[in-house]
Image (tube, rainbow, N blue to C red):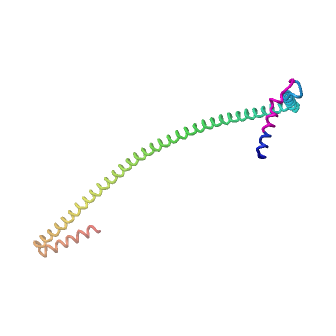
Amino acid sequence: MTKSMRLTLSTLLAGLAASPAFAATGPFFSLRNTDFIVLLAFLLFIGILIYFKVPTLLIGMLDKRADGIKTELEEARALREEAQTLLASYERKHKEVQDQADRIVSSAKEDARLAAEQARADMAKSLDRRMAAAKDQISSAEAAAVKEVRDQAVTIAVAAARDVIAKQMTAAQGNKLIDDGIAQVEAKLH
């Protein structure tokens, strides 16, 4: 057998010999009984824990943790209520802003409608003024044309009369007419 096999076999045998089933022999309240020793060690451990007030410390730590959790829950509840209040406030403000925007839009539409009506009225007035000005210009042009035609007719009539008078008049009659004209001018100027 090799050395490693011997070591493994001896470890296995020592483990079997030291098993708890072989150690717990004899009466229960004996120091040779391992179950009794384990019970005494456990009771000693519990006694030490109680002596150093470990359960009180654990309960205190658990109470602190519970109080911390309770405080966190209350803070969370308060934050939730504050968030709901803020949400309601923002929703109210949003509604107010929406109502104001609707009022502004309707006011702008009304202003645009009134401006369009005013522009139509101004356009009609402007058109009426322009029509009146055009009529005035037309009547003025008609009057100017009539005057020009009359002036031309007078000029033609005077020229025709001059030709007729010149052909029919003698020098003595012409001198008499000139003297009568000078006399009329002298009478009107004095």
The answer to whether 145 appears left or right of 172 in the picture is right
The answer to whether 88 appears left or right of 42 in the picture is left
Q: Nearer the viewer, residue 75 or 66?
A: 66
The answer to whether 75 appears left or right of 24 in the picture is left
Q: Nearer the viewer, residue 130 or 93?
A: 93
Task: Look at the image and say whether residue 18 sits in the magenta stretch.
Answer: yes
Q: Residue at x 64, y 37 (%)?
A: 83
Q: Quadrant of residue 49?
A: top right
- Give above or below for 82 relative to 141: above
Q: Residue at x 73, y 34 (%)?
A: 69
Q: Looking at the picture, how far across and down is residue 9, in whole percent? A: 78, 40
Q: Quadrant of the N terminus?
A: top right
- Give above or below for 53 relative to 111: above
Q: How many marks?
A: 0
Range of residues picked out in magenta:
12-28
Q: Nearer the viewer, residue 101 or 180?
A: 101
Q: Looking at the picture, how far across and down is residue 171, in whole percent? A: 13, 76
Q: Residue at x 11, y 74 (%)?
A: 170
Q: Looking at the picture, how far across and down is residue 29, in whole percent? A: 88, 24
Q: Quadrant of residue 12?
A: top right
- Residue reaching furthest bottom? 171
Q: Quadrant of residue 71?
A: top right
The answer to whether 50 appears left or right of 69 in the picture is right
Q: Quadrant of the C terminus?
A: bottom left
Task: Look at the image and say whether residue 40 sits in the magenta stretch.
Answer: no
Q: Looking at the picture, how far across and down is residue 36, in whole percent? A: 86, 27
Q: Nearer the viewer, residue 93 or 156?
A: 93
